[in-house]
Amino acid sequence: MALPSYAGPLETTWYYTFRFICACIFVFLITPILIIIPLSFNVEPYFTFTQGMLSFDPDAYSLRWYEDFINNTQWTHSVKNSFIIAIASTILATTLGTLAALGLSKPHMPFRALTMGVLISPMIVPLIISAAGMYFFYSSIGLDQSFLGIILAHTVLGTPFVVITVTATLVGFDNSLSRAAANLGANPTTSFFKITMPLILPGVISGALFAFITSFDEVVVVLFLAGFEQRTIPRQMWSGIREQISPTILAVATILVMISIALLTTLEILRRRNEKLRGLTPG
Amino acid sequence: MANDTTADGVVLAADGLPLKASLTRAMRKSRIRALLLVTPLFVFVLFSFLIPIFDMSMRSVDNWHVGTLMPETTKALENWDGKALPEEPVFAALMKDLKAGAISREIGKVGTRLNYEKSGLRSMITSSARKSKKVKEGPYKPIVLKMHKRWKELETWTVIKRNTSKFTIGYYLNAVDMKYDNKTNDIVMQPEDRQIYSTLFLRTFAISLAITLICVVLAYPISYLLATLPTRYSNLLMIFVLLPFWTSLLVRTTAWIAMLQSQGVLNDLFVFFGFVDDANRLQLIHNLTGTIIAMTHILLPFMVLPLYSVMKTIPPSYMRAALSLGANPVTAFVRVYMPQTLAGIGAGSILVFILSIGYYITPALVGGTDGTLISNQIAYHMQTSLNWGLAGALGVLLLFSVLALYMIYNKIVGIDNMRLG
């Protein structure tokens, strides 16, 4: 889309105007996320840049909010909870979701559309409705205010992503490979772990990442189901914003942005690997 | 190869059985295997998700309170014609129920339930139950009528009689701003000043529509840029879309609070450049503006990604052909390029619209009072007012709107083509 050399003044103007508009939109997308990073080093308890920060006075910057985060047992507790819940529900969701995706991709799967609809439903139903339903049901069977309840709830919310990504990977899977394996004497289990699994692994991992982030970022269900003992990071941020807003939240937010950058990089590497494996792009 | 067909022409497989039968058997086996793989997740979703939601939606019609906690009254009222106050047997039954309810301490639930239909009935029920403990013997009618003045009103009895049935549409009526007229038992609109839910539904739809439109307007140019730039630049710029997409919702909401609050970054900038006075900083958050800005930012990637993937498939030669056939750039764009992107606009719009009508977190944190949506009202009735029937009714109405929209989405895009990341 480079500007051709024969472009007239009108086209040139439009070309630069268009680029400017796009730049503004990109700024809109990225600024809020980047701005919290410097703000989290503010020495004052404000959510904006102080005079000292703008003149790059080293005294205006500090790590006090990060210290506060590390020394505050409520926060450290919530970090631990978040990881326990997210990892447990990711493992469950990935296992169940991958199995179901394998079944759904078989050519003779009966009631395919209906089943898919049911399996995807947790992604479609607004979270507030899922949370309300789970609240009543889980408290009637004594699973509210327990880790198990939240893990199960997050597993359900994460499975649609695993089903979708793994099914998408299986579309490109060449079934003659597993037939060849069977022909060469592999039993179905061997053929699954030696042939199928390595090929669909990128899809499984990206599904698992989606499930992880779904749980890690989820707050509505936690609001309804969790007691004080099960508070997660987002839940802690929620009460931080509502009750006692302190820049510690910005420090936490900065750490979370770093985590999402790591996730994004992992996904991009997986995507490239997947394309390479399928021979879609050279090298 | 002599025995591969029978005399009447049926093809046989290697084991001597008809090929058709073996094939059916093999197909059945593979079908069962597929089903077995899907079953664990299916059962799991059914029990931990679909049944809870069904259970919640049943609460929106469930009306057990009067029938279960006042069984005698319910029975005695069966043949009451509703024209005049009931006779002594009904009052005797009522006294029995009140006494039982006062002992089990459950009678307050009846009061709460009846209070949704007519305010003041809760205190009537609880105070009468308290007084009933001292009542020794009848006739009960004059005693009850003296307990609370509302027992003398025909309306009270109409409300009780109506709620002796196991199911009610009362919560749905409430959710669409209607109610029973307690005098005539007809369904009428709520008085103007109490019509809050239709306003709220309309506002939710209007805000979602506005967010969707803003998303289309913002997503179109950058998707176009991303789709037409060489891959190495577009991959780099894609980070600007994907990083927000992958960043925690609460982080983004927090970031907008830092940006928009009156002592925040944006207002500081405005003051610095002299757009606004330091004394009259703009109120950008805890209102409708805050909700729209923050939600647009959060949902924009959901519009860019489908639009981008559609635009990526449009060959640039179409535009060049239109230009070389004499169309000016605007005509070529409107008549040739835009129609090809309609599917992407449709898919993205429905996705953004579905997500925004069910949104809870961001409006709750930055919405103030005029920027809250229907989800916030559901949460309010779940957690604060504890009117779970009404929460259920509002939830079911929201759920059906989302499902209807989702079916349209499925028609346009198809579940299988849903793209993530």
Image (tube, rainbow, N blue to C red):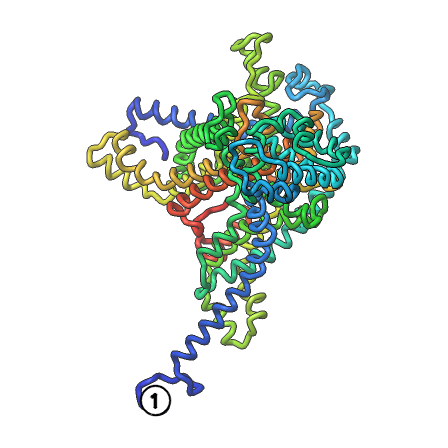
> Residue drawn at (40%, 37%), measured in percent from left and top?
B229
- Location of the N terminus of chain A by quadrant is top left
Q: How would you rate the neighbour count of disc 1 (Cα within 10 Å): few for under 14, some for 14-19, many for 20 or more?
A: few
Residue B311 located left or right of residue B291: left
Front one among B219 and A230: A230
Q: Chain of mark 1?
A: B
Query: How many numbered marks appear?
Result: 1
> Residue drawn at (47%, 41%), measured in percent from left and top?
B400
Residue A162 located left or right of residue B100: left
Residue B113, position as x, y percentages in the image: 61, 35
Q: Which residue is mark 1?
A: B6
Q: Residue B98: name its quadrant.
A: top right
Residue A240, position as x, y percentages in the image: 69, 29
Residue A80, position as x, y percentages in the image: 73, 43
Residue at the bottom extreme, as displayed: B2
Amino acid, disc 1: Thr
Residue B129, position as x, y percentages in the image: 71, 33
Residue A255 located left or right of residue A182: right
Residue at the front extreme, as displayed: B139
Q: Is residue B348 above or below residue A166?
A: above
